[in-house]
């Protein structure tokens, strides 16, 4: 992951770099650092932990200079320590890197043969060492950077800064995104356009394999073959205003609370006619496809998994859901009648992007369902369906998940319509149900106080199990993911009917079991599985509506009463108690809710 930023400017670089890094902290917060060229000399400052530590360090040890590079790290090679923090320096070179240099061990052997030894555990330092060795062989900075890059295997977005060169930065990308920003006599570099939002909205995205030589006068671009190329300069719509918590204790709680409004916007955007026609009906021939393949990671993949039930039940269209890290290497057959859908909040997830590239040119179309429309996944897709969730800052995905579900629901409805899979009456009912979802989500937020009581007790456990059936099964997986992600409680989700095939052995008097049991066609079956758990002493947290609770809530440990809503779209509403349970349990445990340990919001390495 990691975020990188760079500036060749007119003003002091350090505050500009720190501002850019603040916007990139969603990529990692293990350590942060900056390097500048000051009076012709490279110097750097680094600090362990979040950016605030670097900021404090810079107050005591300021760094002057108008040219600089910066980095916020999510550790891959080498522990989170100050020594392993970027920028890495060797002799006359400083470098920041996002990605993984896969052949760094071989390069170290080569460098060792020239008596050049690493000072850190990182793969990145090897890049600086190799470039400096090329300089020592008499190459110019530009040639040294080019020669170094030519020897790298793996994924990288790189920015090089050179001792004695106040007006030169060299950047390159392969597998990791990188944007060059244009100012007035100033130039910028960032992992994404958001990083540069307060500096410029004039952006050129590097393409795969590109290298750029940047001075204050502009940038020259070269493709993977070393040929000079022109890359489009675009004006992007990114908001420079920083997002605040609006009085909430955490971004996650704010983002949970926003869902009635953002869902209403998303549903209105797609159901009001014109946009659905322009973006979906006129772009996608859903009657001509014989299957849909949906690919994503983490929570986004669970949104796909819920949608699989909808596409199959409502539109009669077979759907395969795959996690991107497996899909990309499996070489699955994709025919011209396969519609592929890639779902991603950030639009930068490395595995999802690689899976998309595998499908481009093979599938009938490549559709992106994304929150960040200026993202790599959006830029490389045939059709982009924005989810309009607004900035999601908390690492745990909440409103992006429900907005992804809303867009996939509209797509399932469209597929049913185009394929004639449902009568007009059924389609109308499904559509009016979807319009009701935002207000039902608002009602579901009313479970907050009851869930706080449950969370206070759940927080004292080390494990938890989540059960669901049908489209609530993937939601059980999502509930478990959310809980472990921010509360660090070990949690697993299962299809309720699968429990007796193994996991039931885990049930004892200490095991909390969250059961998603709306009063629908699956209710009796789910309740039977719930009884099997209760018979073995398991502590049931039943999440159901008034009817379900009155029928089967007796003797459960806790009951959470949800609004009555028997509909295909019920998983959107039942997402709310999953999020609240994780949130309040994490608060009870005092974890870092918005930036949980070991995680990053955007996973840009595989
Ligand atoms: O940006 P993406 O939607 O592609 O991210 C995918 C996952 O990394 C993400 O959903 C992750 O699982 C969340 N932290 C879950 O809350």
Image: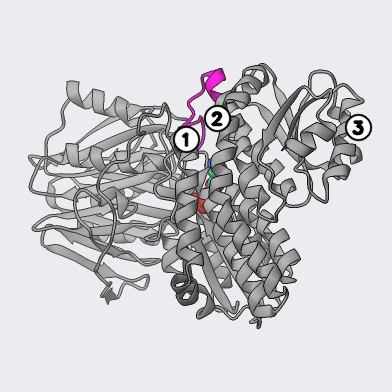
Label 2 crowd bin: few (<14), some (14–19), many (20+), radius 10 Å: many
Q: Position of residue 238 (x, y in %)?
A: 29, 55
Which sits earlier in the primary sequence, circle 2 or circle 3? Answer: 3
- Which residue is more in the foreground, 443 or 420? 443
User: Is the CB–ligand 1 distance for label 1 below 8 Å?
Assistant: no
Residue 585 versus residue 364: which sits nearer the camera? 585
Q: Is the C-beta separation of discs 2 and 1 under 8 Å? A: yes
Using the image, determine if residue 89 lies above or below residue 239. Answer: above
Q: Image check: 187 left or right of 456?
A: left
**Residue at point 73%, 28% (across, down):** 559
Query: Residue 145 location, x and y as percent?
Result: 29, 56
What is the C-alpha distance between the residues marked 2 and 1? Answer: 8 Å
Q: Is residue 449 visible?
A: yes
Q: Is residue 593 magenta?
A: yes
- Mark 2 lies on a secondary structure that is helix
Q: Residue at x 20, y 58 (%)?
A: 140
Which label belongs to residue 583? 2
Instruction: Report the residue at 65% width, 83% height from top.
Output: 288
Judge whether 385 appears above or below 461 on screen. below
Q: Main secondary structure of the magenta part?
A: loop
Q: Earlier in the sequence, mark 2 or mark 1?
A: 1
Report which quarter residue 327 is drawn in: bottom right
Q: Which residue is mark 1?
A: 252
Magenta segment range? Answer: 586-599
Percent position of residue 462, x then y: 70, 21
Q: How is the image coloured?
A: one colour
* Mark 1, other Cα within 10 Å: few <14 / some 14–19 / many ≥20: many
Q: CA distance from mark 1 to mark 3?
A: 35 Å
The residue that label 3 is drawn on is 532
Q: CA distance from mark 2 to mark 3?
A: 28 Å
């Amino acid at each position: 992951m990691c975020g990188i930023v760079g500036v060749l400017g007119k003003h002091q670089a350090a505050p500009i770099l720190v501002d850019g890094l603040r916007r990139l902290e969603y990529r990692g917060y293990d350590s942060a650092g900056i390097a500048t060229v000051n009076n012709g000399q490279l110097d750097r400052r680094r600090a362990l932990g979040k950016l605030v530590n670097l900021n404090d360090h810079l107050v005591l040890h300021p760094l002057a200079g108008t040219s600089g590079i910066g980095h916020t790290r999510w550790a891959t090679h080498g522990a989170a320590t100050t020594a392993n923090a970027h920028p890495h320096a060797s002799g006359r070179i400083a470098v920041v890197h996002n990605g993984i240099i896969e052949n760094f061990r071989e390069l170290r052997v080569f460098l060792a043969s020239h008596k050049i030894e690493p000072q850190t555990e990182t793969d990145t330092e090897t890049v600086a060492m190799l470039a400096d060795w090329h300089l020592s062989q008499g190459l110019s900075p530009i040639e040294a950077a080019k020669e170094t890059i030519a020897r790298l295997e793996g994924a990288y977005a790189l920015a090089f800064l050179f001792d004695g060169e106040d007006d030169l930065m060299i950047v390159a990308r392969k597998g990791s995104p990188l944007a060059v920003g244009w100012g007035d006599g100033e130039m910028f570099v960032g992992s994404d356009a958001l990083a540069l939002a307060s500096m410029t909205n004039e952006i050129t995205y590097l393409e795969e394999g590109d290298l750029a030589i940047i001075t204050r006068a502009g940038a020259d671009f070269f493709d993977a073959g070393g040929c000079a190329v022109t890359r489009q300069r675009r004006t992007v719509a990114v908001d420079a205003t920083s997002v605040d918590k609006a009085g909430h204790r955490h971004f996650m709680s704010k983002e949970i609370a926003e869902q009635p409004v953002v869902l209403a916007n998303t549903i209105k955007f797609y159901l009001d006619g014109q946009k659905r026609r322009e973006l979906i009906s006129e772009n996608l021939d859903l009657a001509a496809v014989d299957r849909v393949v949906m690919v994503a990671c983490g929570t986004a993949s669970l949104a796909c998994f819920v949608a699989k039930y909808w596409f199959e039940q409502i539109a009669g269209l077979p759907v395969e859901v795959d996690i991107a890290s497996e899909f990309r290497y499996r070489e699955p057959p994709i025919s011209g009648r396969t519609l592929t859908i890639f779902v991603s909040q950030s639009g930068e997830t490395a595995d999802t992007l690689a899976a998309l590239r595998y499908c481009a040119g093979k599938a009938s179309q490549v559709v992106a369902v994304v929150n960040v429309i200026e993202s790599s996944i959006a830029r490389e897709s045939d059709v982009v369906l924005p989810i309009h969730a607004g900035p999601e800052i908390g690492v745990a995905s909440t409103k992006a998940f429900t907005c992804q579900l809303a867009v996939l629901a509209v797509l399932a409805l469209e597929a049913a319509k185009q394929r004639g899979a449902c009568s007009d009456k059924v389609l109308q009912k499904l559509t009016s149900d979807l319009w009701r979802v935002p207000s039902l989500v608002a009602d579901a937020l009313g479970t907050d106080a009851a869930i706080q009581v449950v969370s206070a007790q759940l927080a004292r456990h080390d494990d938890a199990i989540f059960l669901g059936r049908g489209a609530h099964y993937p939601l059980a997986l999502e509930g478990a993911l959310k809980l472990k992600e921010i509360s660090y409680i070990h949690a697993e989700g299962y299809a309720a009917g699968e429990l007796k095939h193994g996991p039931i052995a885990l049930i004892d008097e200490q095991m909390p079991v969250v059961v998603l049991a709306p009063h629908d066609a699956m209710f009796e079956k789910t309740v039977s599985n719930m009884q099997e758990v209760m018979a073995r002493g398991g502590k049931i947290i039943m999440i159901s509506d008034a009817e379900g609770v009155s029928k089967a809530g007796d003797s459960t440990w806790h009951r959470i009463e949800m609004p009555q809503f028997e509909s295909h779209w019920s998983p959107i509403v039942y997402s709310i108690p999953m999020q609240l349970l994780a949130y309040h349990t994490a608060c009870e445990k005092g974890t870092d809710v918005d930036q949980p340990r070991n995680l990053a919001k955007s996973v840009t390495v595989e």
